[in-house]
Structures are given as structure tokens and as C-alpha cells.
Image (cartoon, helix red, strand yellow):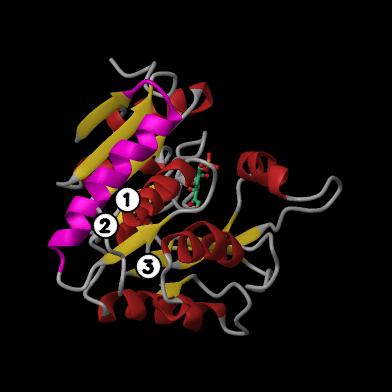
Amino acid sequence: MEVIICSDEQAVGRIAADRITKVLSRAETPVLGVATGSTPLTTYSSLAALAAEGKADFTGLRAFALDEYVGLPADDERSYAATIRHTVTEQLGLDAANVHTPDGMADDLDAACAAYEKAIRDVNGVDVQILGIGANGHIGFNEPTSSLSSRTRVKTLAERTKADNARFFERGEKVPSHCVTQGLGTIMDARNVVLLAVGANKADALAGAVEGPVSAMCPGSVLQFHPHVLVIADEAAASKLT
Ligand code: F6R
């Protein structure tokens, strides 16, 4: 793993956007894996700035999101489909038809998960996957104890994750208890991974993922088996790396 430690969140986004653009520019039909959450927001705005300056061209770029809540339709502003639409599709000027999010509303969720895996395979896989990391070490919504070879499936959200994500819901509103998420095996199929971490509350999780034993108790640690991982963290998130 290559680890870059930056002074602040803005620098994390700038460096990530530079690297991601380089990888995508080498791909014939580029495919970007996108994460929701707060961490990648500076990366998305930096990617948009590169495009505005003519230093990147995202025409034809396809994107696949990591996860979605079960029970929230794409037009619900709290859904990850809506988040990706605002932060990625609109900001980077992508064709909405090229941007995919798992379907958390399908009658047959297992079939929808299998179809999502097939859709990723059909575009020849992901060139570069952007990841954040949960305070409990999750990547995507693969919570601790997730199988290291798992594929896209329905998962129960950990209590800590629900508490962390309650900020996106009104007071008193319940955070959905289930999600559809790409599996750890699915994420590991991406040809390149950029793992982002910002803030002191990610320091333990990042140290576990980068330097801890590979264990389902810290799902991010599976990335130690991946040949092309770039970790970009601010000083606070990197504070527990040796
Ligand atoms: C989001 C996702 C999650 C987040 C993680 C960190 O699609 O898959 O793994 O990346 O929960 O979230 P933030 O960035 O909000 O701290």
C-alpha cells in the first residue's frame, strides 16, 4: 500500500482527484467506483474543478456506487442514489444513464444484487474505486464479521454505523436497518483502490486497515491483499499509523 499523509481535508481531495484522473485517462472506457459519506466530498469537488479547468474529461465516464439503504427510493433525498446524483452525476456532468446505484427497493433484493454484480462485470469492472472507512473499519457497508470474499448482498447495519449516519436524517427519524452493499470480494475486484480517511475518529480504523492483522473484524484490512491501494489521509486520521 502507498500511504500519503496530507495537512488537511482539501489536500486529501486534491491529491485523490489528481491520481484518479490519471488512472481514468489511461482506461479505454473508464469506470469509477464511488462512495457516499462526507469523506469523498472534497475529492468530488476537486474532480469537478479539474474538469472545469480542462484538465480532465469525464465524458462517457461510468460510475457504480458502493451501497444503498433498503427501503429508500432514488427520489428520497436521504437515499444514496440521491446523494450520488448531487455529488457525482451533477457535479461531474455525467450522463445519469451511466451512473448506477444498487436497488434497495427491489421486490427480489437477491436478484437485484446479482444483477448489480453482472452490470459491473459487463463494463469490464471498475478502474478505480474510491472508498471511505467507517469508524468500525467498515468499507462499503461491510460491517465487522463480513466475509472477506463477499459479493453484493443485503446486510444489517451495525448500531455504530446507524448512529454515525443519523446526522443525515431528521431528529427522531429512524435510520434504515438494512442496506444493499457491494461485498468485500466485489470491492477487491477493482483494478485500483483509493482509500480516503479524514479526522481523528478514523485513526483506529485506518491503523487497523493498513497495519493491523487481516481480519473480518476490521473489513478494511482485506485491502492489504490488494496490489494497487493508495491511502490518502489527513494527519489526524493517520495519527495511529506507525
Ligand atoms: C459510503 C460507504 C461507507 C462510508 C463510511 C465513511 O458509501 O460505503 O463505507 O465510506 O461510512 O463515511 P464518512 O465518509 O461519512 O465518514
- Can residue 195 be spotted in the picture? yes
Q: Which of the labelled discs sits on residue 56, or is there none?
A: 2
Q: Residues within 10 Å of mark 3 (few under 14, many from 20)?
A: many
The amino acid on which the numbered mark 2 sits, given as a three-letter code, is Ala
Residue 20 among magenta residues: yes
Q: Magenta span covers which residues?
A: 6-27
Label 1 amino acid? Leu
Residue at the image position 42 percent from the left and 24 percent from the top: 8
| Nearer to me, 204 or 230 | 230
Indicate the quadrant where residue 126 lies: bottom left
> Is residue 47 located in the magenta-colored stretch of the structure?
no
Indicate left or right for 220 with 229 as reference: right
Mark 2 crowd level (few <14, some 14–19, many ≥20, 10 Å Cα): some
Q: Which mark is residue 50?
A: 1
Task: Name the residue: 28% across, 56% down.
Answer: 54
- Secondary structure, magenta segment, majority class: helix
Can the viewer see residue 144? Answer: no
Residue 194 vertical position relative to residue 2 in the rendered view, above or below: below
Q: Nearer the viewer, residue 73 or 70?
A: 73
The answer to whether the residues at label 1 and label 2 have Cβ atoms under 8 Å apart is: yes
Location of residue 99 (image quadrant): bottom left
The secondary structure type at the circle numbered 1 is helix
Identified at 44% across, 24% down, the residue is: 204
Q: Earlier in the sequence, mark 3 or mark 1?
A: 1
Taking 50 as reference, is 114 left or right? right
The kind of residue on which mark 3 rests is Ala
Horizontal arrangement in the rendering, residue 26 relative to residue 189 (left or right): left
Point out residue 10 in the picture as x, y percentages from the top left corner: 42, 32
**Distance Cα–Cα, label 2 vs label 3:** 16 Å
How many numbered discs sit on the rendered protein? 3
Which of the image's four quarters has the N terminus? top left
